[in-house]
Structure formats: C-alpha cells, structure tokens
Amino acid sequence: MAVVRTVLPNTGLIQPQHGLTQYEADQDANWALLDTLVATSSQQAVDLGLNGVYSGFALSTSATLVPGLTTGVLYAQGKRYAPTSAPTLAGAPAGATNYLFYNSATGFYYQASPVGATAGDALIGKVTTNATAVTAVVQGTKVFGSVAAAPTAAGDLALQHYLGRTPIAAAIQMTSGGAIWFQAARYDATNLYLVSSSGAGDVTARVVVW
C-alpha cells in the first residue's frame, strides 16, 4: 500500500503517518501548531527587517585568499541559514578590501560596498588581502550587537556600524562620564552619526544596533 505523506504548507514539515496510535487528531493539531510557529519565527525577520548574523560566522585571516569562517546562525531575506559545518568560500579578490555577504538565493559573495547588494543580505564582515593571502578581517556586527565609540575629538563624528544595512534602531550605552548622543541624521546603511561632549579620550560608549 502506498504511503501518503502530508506536507505542511508553511515550512514543508512532513506530518507523521496515521494509524500508529489512537491520537491522530492530537498529532495533527500539534504538527499544525509547530508548522505555524516555525513559519512565524522566520517571517518576523522579514517583517521587522532583522536580517544579519545572530551568532558565529567568525572570520579569520588565512595564508590563501580564502578567509577562515566558522559555522553560525544568520537570517537573509528572512530565511534562516545555520550550516552544520564550516561553509566553503570562494577566494576574495587579491590586493583589495571587500565585504563578505550572504544572500539566501545565491550564497556568499564579495563586494566593495559595505551595504548589501540586495535587500535582506547578511553582512559577515570585511576582508583585506594582498596578492596571495587574507591579511586582515573585521567582523560584521551581529543583530543586537554593539559598536564601540571612543571619540578623539569633541563634536560630530561618523562611526561605521558594520551591520550591512540601515539599523532598525540603535541605543547608546555610556561606559564613561561625559556624553555621546545622536546627530539629527542618527544613522544610515553605513554609519552611526554621533556627537561627543569631549575629545580628550575620556568619553566612551557602546552603541547597540539591530
């Protein structure tokens, strides 16, 4: 007898075969709930624009043009990507500084701009190379991560946030005396725009972005 499988509509989960217990109605209800909840968790990243790295995906330098990269969890275009082994990357362009992004449809790519080529792309970080090797990396800022602010002059300053997109919001958390606050522009897809009360190196803060 052929096995009929029910594929749930939101996530593609396969509902267990009936006839094994006397609680099919309960099983159906539980699986329908799971299907909805899993779909909702991904949809929130789409609705709120919270694409980016949530954990892991640590970059490292390399003796070749292929940077080191660990496993992790990210959302791109609202889709979760969490490989069980380290992703395989192409080599970065030689003798250049580029940003490494992930797109849910096309995978990893490098580009000169710190802003994703497509809405919803997740920034992994910045990669600098010479002719043969990756010589320096800067980790992208995770969703709900923070950026250190240590102004060297009083007044306005622009601080790159490495989020790869315009933040949904940002919050300044002072780690010293003095004050740092937002300019009228606040932030864009590349920078945070801040004002410092001092430039003597005695004013510091963390700016949380998401």
Image (cartoon, grey):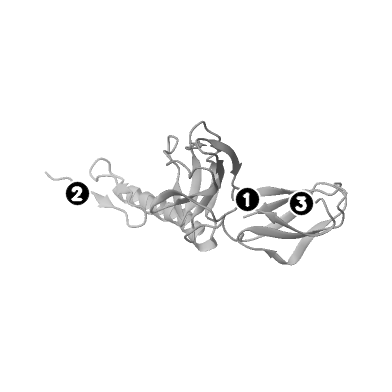
Secondary structure found at label 1: loop
Q: Which residue is mark 1?
A: 144
CA–CA distance between discs 1 and 3? 13 Å
Of the pair 53 and 27, the residue shown nearer to us: 53
Which amino acid type is shown beneath numbered disc 2?
A: Val
Residue lying furthest top: 63
Mark sitting on residue 36 = none
Residue lying furthest bottom: 184
| Left or right of 68 on screen, residue 167 | right
Q: Which residue is mark 2?
A: 4
Q: Residues within 10 Å of mark 2 (few under 14, many from 20)?
A: few
Q: Nearer the viewer, mark 3 or mark 2?
A: 3
Secondary structure found at label 2: loop
| Left or right of 108 on screen, residue 59 | right
Which amino acid type is shown beneath numbered disc 3?
A: Gln
- Residue 90: x and y in percent read 42, 42
Which residue: 39% across, 52% down? Answer: 106
Q: Residues within 10 Å of mark 3 (few under 14, many from 20)?
A: some
Q: Which residue is mark 3?
A: 173
Q: Earlier in the sequence, mark 1 or mark 3?
A: 1
- Residue 132: x and y in percent read 50, 35
In the displayed structure, would residue 165 be above or below residue 130? below
Q: Nearer the viewer, mark 1 or mark 2?
A: 1
CA–CA distance between discs 1 and 2? 44 Å
In the displayed structure, would residue 69 be above or below residue 41? above
Q: Earlier in the sequence, mark 3 or mark 2?
A: 2
In the displayed structure, would residue 79 be above or below residue 133? below
Q: Earlier in the sequence, mark 1 or mark 2?
A: 2
